[in-house]
Image (tube, grey):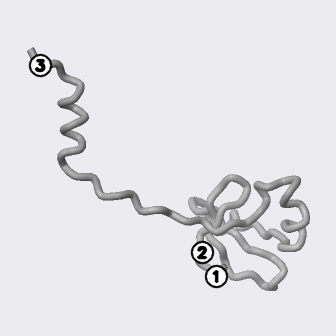
Amino acid sequence: MQPGSIVRCRNRDWVLLPAETDEVWALRPLTGADDDVVHIHKGLSNLIRYTLPFEQVERVCFRCRPPMTLQTPLRRICSGRRRV
């Protein structure tokens, strides 16, 4: 993972920052400030990942939603109406 990547850890999304050493990840919450940076030791995270899986740092993948046509919302509205 490269600095600038978005990762998931502790049930939260983070931005991966450059770290001083290769042994730690420096993470800033996606919606946080620079003062909220957390350092996680890679080796320790790997050791406890089965006991505490939310401590594992994982890459986040955002999926694109298929484009919605204009007819789809109208069908939902019209399908609930009864014809008299």
In this figure, which residue is indicated by the disc labeled 1?
Answer: 2
Crowdedness of circle 2 by 10 Å Cα count: few (<14), some, many (20+)?
A: few
Q: Is residue 26 left or right of residue 43?
A: left
Nearer to us: label 3 or label 1: 3
* Marks 1 & 2, CB-CB < 8 Å contact: yes
Tag 1: residue type?
Answer: Gln
Q: Is residue 25 left or right of residue 41?
A: left
Label number found at residue 23? none
Label 3, label 1: how far apart the Cα atoms are: 58 Å
User: Where is mark 3, residue-wise?
Assistant: 83
Q: Residue 56 at what x, y percent from top left?
A: 77, 62
- Of residues 54 and 34, the one drawn nearer to the viewer in this rendering: 54
Q: 50 above or below 15?
A: above
Residue depicted at x 73% and y 73%: 26
Tell me the distance, in whole angstroms, between the alpha carbons under discs 3 and 2.
53 Å
Of residues 55 and 49, which is closer to you in this image?
49
Look at mark 2 in the image and give the residue it sits on.
5
For this rendering, which residue is in front, 34 or 6?
6
If you read the primary sequence from the N terminus, does the residue marked by circle 3 or circle 2 appear first? 2
Separation of disc 1 and disc 2 at Cα? 6 Å
- Residue 16 placement: quadrant: bottom right
